[in-house]
Amino acid sequence: MMGVYANSSVKAIMSNKSKALAFIKVGKDIAFPADLSCIMTPMPRSLAHVNDACCQVLSENRLRYAQFWFMQMDATDTEALNQLSLGDLDVALRIWSEQETMSSLQNRMICYFLQEDLPSAFSTAETLYEKYGQAFIQQIDMPGSSQMSTSELSHLFLETLGAEVDLASLYDCCQSDEWKEIVTSIVVQSATSELSYEIEQYRNVNHTDPVTLKKAGENLMERSKKPLNNLQKVLSKESTQYQMLADKVGEEILNCCIEYVNLAQSDIYDSVHSIYKLLIYAKNTIVGMVAKRRFEQNYDMIKPLLSISKEDYKRAMRRPYMKKIRWGVILSIMITVGIIVAFMEKELSGFWMGLAMSVPLCVLTNRVMLLFE
């Protein structure tokens, strides 16, 4: 917006501001060499935009912005920037690759970003800050910037980058332990914040409505996948930090399943099968032994329902009632036949004879009714 390079002086910034505002006030467009309009999206300038941009690059934020823009320090930079202004990024990159200076590393990094080659940009940045971190800080015309350490500069770069790209996926590109530690701390902090927010969102829904509860559990499952996956890229599953966060998510999902099944007691089979994906996600997410034992205790109670068909479940639920009916029918047959024989024989002993005579019929009835169970 200001049409300057990362290492331009405050004087140059103010000069461009005056020129831009003068052109804008008379309704004309203005172009600066640093616009690089052949490779960058044209940026419309307005009074508000220019004033705001000027305030930003003259504030404590200037170093952050400077980390992600081109520098012009020597003849090589001028030659390569001229190629960029013509739209030839590959040639410019080749020119900067012929030497290793602070500005060449900075400018190569920006070219890699423009090519969306994140690993190359990342590794170039690490080399830049490792070798020329303090020199970079000194080149930025900003009061008080010299007090920043190289480590703080690296953290600022990675923190800013992490807001735009998946920083965890670049962890393996780290060459130094220091950068690995910085990336890990940023990823863990970001994942912790995301997971805490999603868990809070889940807890705040109406837990008495099964439909709302299940939907909230599914949302938590989907939205926790990315932060947990990012954590696995920078932490081992055995690490305390990972276990704590993973168990927290897994136990919330398990609680959702338990509550949902309890709310749907009229149709246990369907409710258990409808939250199967949630159960498996909780099982695969939980790491700690205590959380695993709690999961297994609850899972064992519904596991039989997951291994049978719905028809088998209905048959199993119907069997106790059918058994009572079957024995009731058999007993009724025996008593009825006994009474009929006793009446025909006009003797009480006929009742016992009738009971004996009813045995074949009762056996047949028993077998027939077993088929319905």
Image (cartoon, helix red, strand yellow):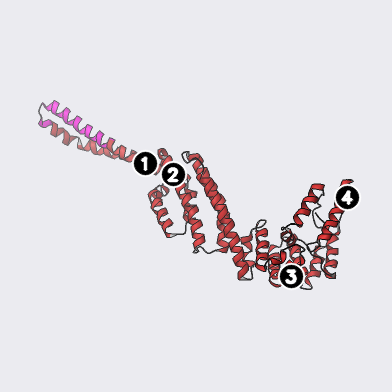
Name the residue located 22 percent from the left edge and 32 percent from the top edge.
333
Distance of label 1 from label 3 (alpha carbons): 79 Å
Q: Which numbered marker is on residue 135? A: 3
Question: Which amino acid, mark 1?
Answer: Arg
- Seen in the picture, residue 318 relative to 222 is either above or below; the reply is above
Classify mark 3: residues with Cα within 10 Å, few (<14), some (14-19) or many (20+): some
Distance of label 4 from label 2 (alpha carbons): 67 Å
Distance of label 3 from label 2 (alpha carbons): 59 Å
Secondary element at tag 3: helix
Distance of label 3 from label 4 (alpha carbons): 35 Å
Secondary element at tag 1: helix
Distance of label 1 from label 2 (alpha carbons): 26 Å
Estimate the x, y position of residue 193 in percent, counting from the top left: 57, 54
Q: Which numbered marker is on residue 22? A: 4
Q: Is residue 283 left or right of residue 139?
A: left
Q: Which residues are drawn in magenta?
A: 325-350
The mark that comes first in sequence, 1 or 3, is 3
Classify mark 2: residues with Cα within 10 Å, few (<14), some (14-19) or many (20+): some
Residue for badge 1:
315
Which dot, 3 or 2, sits closer to the camera?
3
Which dot, 4 or 2, sits closer to the camera?
4
The mark that comes first in sequence, 1 or 2, is 2
Classify mark 1: residues with Cα within 10 Å, few (<14), some (14-19) or many (20+): some
Question: Which amino acid, mark 2?
Answer: Glu
Residue for badge 2:
259
The answer to whether marks 1 and 3 mark residues whose Cβ atoms lie closer than 8 Å is no
